[in-house]
Amino acid sequence: MSTQQPTDAEPNVETDADAESESESFTGTGLPRVEDHRILTGEAEYIHDVTPESCLHMALVRSMHAHAEIVDIDTSEAEDHPECELVLTAEDVKEQYNPMPTGIPEVETDDGVEPLEEWSLAGDVARFVGEPVAAVFATNRYVAEDAADLIDVEYDTKEAVADGMAAREDEVVVHESVGTNVIDGERIEFGDPETTFEEADHVVEGEYSWGRISGVPLETAGVVATYDDETDSFDIDCNIQLHTLVDDTIYETLGYDADDVRVNVPADVGGSYGTKIAIHRYCCLAAMASKELDRPIKFVEDRIENLQGGDMHCSDREYRMRMAVDDDGTMCGLDVWFVDDFGAFPRYPVNQVLKPLSVVTNSYAIDDVVYEYELALTNKTSQTAYRGFGVDPHIYALEMIVDEAAREVGMDPTEFRRRNLIEPDQMPYTLPSKNIYDSGDYPATLERIQEIIDDERDGGLLDPEVVGAKREEGKYRGVQPSVIIEPGVSGSDWTDRQRSDREELEGRSREEVAELPEHLRAELRADGTVRASLATDSSGQGHQTLVSQLLADELEILPSDIEVDYLDSVDAPTEYGSAASRMAVMLSGATVGVAERLLENAEELAADHWGVSSDGVQYRDGSVERVDGDDSLSLADLADIDADRDERLTQVSYNYDHPATDHEEFDEAFRRKFPVYPTAAFGANAPIVEVDVETGEVDILKFYTVRDCGTMLNPMIVEGQAHGGIAQGVGAALLEEFGYEDDGQPQAITLFDYLLPSIENVPEIEMEHTVTPSPYTETGAKGVGEGGMIDAPASIATSINAALDPLEIDEPADRIPVAPDHLRKKVRDADQ
Amino acid sequence: MSTDSTGDYDGPVTEEISVTVNGETVTAEVEPRLKLSDFLRNECGLHGVRVGCEHGVCGACTVQQEGRTVKSCLSYAVQADGMEIETVEGLAEDGSLHPIQEAFHETHALQCGFCTSGFVMATKELLEENPDPSREEIETGLADNICRCTGYQNIYEAVERAADRMEGGE
Ligand code: FES
Ligand code: FES
C-alpha cells in the first residue's frame, strides 16, 4: 500500500555523534555521509592524485580524421626526444597482445563468420576522430605531449558515415571485412500485434530523434599501471566502473590470467554514471608500456580527448513509433522500431538496446507489442553506458507517441494516460516482455501530481490570467505529467543475449541460468570495531555510508565503529557491482546477510568459550551475554578469542543472490534472456515550462516530482540521486548533444560546445515521496540510481508539447535535445 | 635558469617563483608553461585543487588568488609569482571544518566530490561579498562552477546554512 509520506531528508544539524546517540535506527534516516570529510578537506585521493615515484606519463596521438587509411607512422623524431622513453604503435601491440573484447565479437556474413576486432591502437584504418594511433611515454605529461606532437602520421582519407540512418545504407562501410554497418538487430513480437494493429480504430505514427549524449563526469578517465617483473603480474589503479566484472576487458587484452591483473579503484571516483565502464583501452596501453619499461605509467585523459574520442558517448537513436488506439481511448498495441548509432565499435554495453524491454509499455497496460532495433556502426567514437542505459530514449519516444495518440482520439492527454495505467490490483504485473513490476499505485501518483498542477492553476505559475498575459509576450507555459517506471536491479544472465543463439533460447531450461550475487565481507577487529569490504566500486553514491548505517543497526553498534573499504579485482569474486540501479537492493541485502552471519558466529564463539549451549547466549548491543547473566563478551573480547583459532569466526562473507532468482514468476524472462529487473520504482513529474517562441528557448520555471522507490534506506541520498538524475535529464532534454558534421568531425569537443547544466539551468525541484516497499527485496528497497535521467527528459518533452498546444505545431518536441534552433524552426514551419 | 641554447639538451627553461600558498611560502623552479593548477597539485601537493576541463568551464580548479577566486587552470604558475593563494586545504582549522565545509556535509551538497573544492571556494567569495545572499544571488555567484551529481538543490541549502552560521563573522 502506498502512503503519502513527505520525508524530511534534513539531517540532524548537531554533530554526527550526537545524531547517532539520539537515533534509534540509522537506516531510514538521512545520516550524513562518512565519505564527506576527506573530500571537503581536499584529502580524498582520486586517480589523478596517484603518482608513484619514478612513474612515466602517457600521451596519445589520435586520428584527426573520421575515416582514413594509416599509410605510415614516423616515430623517429619522438623517439629522439631526450625525455621520451617509448613509443607504441599498433604493430607493437599486435605482436604481443590481443584485441580488446567487444560486445559483438563476430558477425555472420555471406562468406562465413567474420571477427570484428578492436585493438588498443588503430592499425591499418582509423575509424573515428580521436581514435588513438600511437602512444608516447615520457617523464611528465607536458613532455609526453611534446613528443606526441613529433609523431608524423600519414593518412589517406576515406569517405565517412556519421549518421545511423545513413549507415544502414552501407554505402560507406566502417568495417570492410564485415561488409555491413548493421551488425546486430532483432525483431521480437509479444501477443498478437498484427491483428491488433489491423483491427484498432486508429493507428498513429511518429518519428523521434534522441541526440547523442553522455554522462560527462567532472573527472575524466585515468590509470596508473605498474608491472611486477618478479611475479609477471600487473597492478592497475584506475577509475573504471564495475572493476570486478569488466576486468576481463583488461586481462584478456593483455593475455594474462585474471589473478595476475589486479585492478584497483580508489575509494573516490569523480562521477561515472555508467560512462567509465569502457576505459580499458587506457589501462591496457599503460600496462603494456609498464611491462616494457619496468616503470609505473600514468595517464589521465584531458577533457578534449574525453569528449571527442573517450569511448564514452551513449545512445544516439532514431525512432519510428506506432500506437494502435481505440475510440474509447484504449491503447491496444505498440510498435517500436529504432536504429542506434553505436559509433565505430560495438563496445561491451550493446545490450542497452534491449534494456527498454524491461519497461516496454512504461506504466500502461498494453498486451500486443513489437520491439525491433538495428545496431549500426558509424565513424564516431564508441558508445558506452550512461545512467538509464538506453531506457531514457525509449520512454521519451513512447511518451511522444502517447501524446500523439491522445490528440488523435481527441482526449485530454492526462485522462488518456490515466485510463491506460496499470492498476494497483494488477500488481505484481507481468509485462508482455516478461519482466514484472513489483508494486505501486500508479493512478494515485498521477492524481497527486495533478493536484499539485491544479494548485498552480489557482493563482500560481499556471493561473489562466498569468498564462494568458505571458502568451501576449510570446511566452507559452504548459505542463504534461505521466507516470514513468525506473527498472531496478538488473540481472546479469540476460546481458549476453546478443552473443547467444537466440533461437536456442526458446528451449532453454531454468537450470542453465546463472546469476551473479553481490558479495560483502565483514570482520571484527582487535579493538572491537568492524571492517566491511565492498566488492564493488563507488563514484559518489555513498555506499560506505549506506553499509555503515545498515550494519550499525544489524549489529546494534554505532556507524562510527564501522569502517568500510574496497576489494580489488583479485581479492573480490567476479560479481556485477554498482550499475543498473542495483546497489540499494543488492548491497542492503548483502549487508543484512553478512551481519546475520557475524552475529551467529559471535554467539557460537561465546558459547564455545563459556562451554554452554548456543541457547545459553544472546547477542545484544555489541556484545554477547550469557542468558544466566553471569558474563558478557564485547566485540573486542570476541576478536581476541577468535585470533588464535584456525578457522576464524569473526571474518565472514556473504553473497546476496539476485532477488528475482527466488521467484518463479521471473523464470520465463530468465530462460529466454529477456531483461530481468525485479524492482519498479516510479514517479510522475510536472516540470512547468515556458517556451519563448521568439527565441525558441525553454525555461523550466519549477520542477515538481512525486516519487516512490520503496523503502528509503537513506532518504537524503535517495533525494540526492533524484536531484542529480533530474538535472542530467534537464541537460539531455534542452542542452547537451555530441553533434557531428557529415564528414564525421565532432562539433562538441570542449565544455563550451557540450553544454552541461549549470546552477542557472536547473530549476527548483520540489519532491514528494510515497513508499511502496518491494515484495521481492530483503529491505523493501527498490533501485533508485537512474530514475531522474529516465523520467525527466520525457516529462520535459511532453510539457513542451503541452505548452505549444495552442499553436498547433506538429510535434514540437520530436527531437532531443529540444534546442532553441529546433523549436524556432518548428514555430516558423507552423506559421507558414 | 637553464637554457637549451647550446643544442645539447639539458632540460627545459625554468624560472624561480615564490608563492605564498595557504600562508606558507613556496619557492620553486618552474617551466613558464606550467599551469597554476598543476603547480598547486604537483609542486605543492594540494590535491584539493581538482582539474576537470583545463579550459575554464567547470570550476573544479577554483582557488583564491589575492583574495579573489580564479580558475587556476587558466593561468600559469609564473603569473602567481609573489602572490598569495588559498586553496580548500587552507580552510579547516585544527582539524575542524570551516562553516562552509560543515554546511556542505550536513546538507548533502556533494556526491562524487570532484566539484566540491571549487564550490566551497566559490561560496567563500560569495559570502565574503554578500553575507546573506538570496537564491538569485547564489545562482549568479555559483554560475561558473559545474556539478554533475547533485542537481544543485542541496548546494543552495549549504550556502544558506553556511551564511546563517557565519553571520556576525567567523
Ligand atoms: S579545470 Fe579549471 S575550469 Fe575546469
Ligand atoms: S558532486 Fe560530483 S560533480 Fe559535484
Image (spheres, coloured by chain):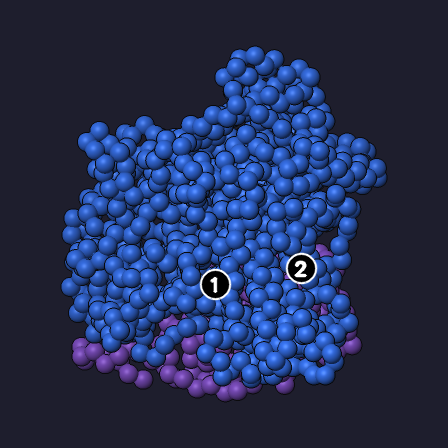
Taking the image as drawn, is residue A474 in sight?
no
Q: Position of residue A274 (x, y in %)?
A: 47, 52
Q: Is residue A47 above or below residue B84?
A: above
- Chain letter for mark 1: A
- Location of residue A698 by image quarter: top right
Q: Quadrant of residue A427?
A: top right
Q: Residue at x 40, y 64 (%)?
A: A569
**Residue A524, percent across and down?**
56, 76
Residue that label 1 marks: A535
Q: Secondary structure beneath disc 1?
A: loop
* Chain with colour purple in the figure: B
Residue count near mark 2 (Cα–Cα under 10 Å), binned few <14, some 14–19, many ≥20: many
Q: Position of residue A610 (x, y in %)?
A: 62, 82
Residues at discs 2 and 1 both on one chain: yes
* Residue A788 on image: x %, y %: 61, 47
Say the numbered circle drawn on residue A714.
2
- Relative to A592, is B168 above or below? below
Q: Amino acid at mark 2?
A: Asn
Check the rendered structure and report the hue given to chain A: blue
The extreme right residue here reads A459
Instruction: Name the image quarter holding residue B141.
Output: bottom right
Residues A365 and A660: in front is: A660
Say whether marks 2 and 1 touch (CB < 8 Å). Answer: no
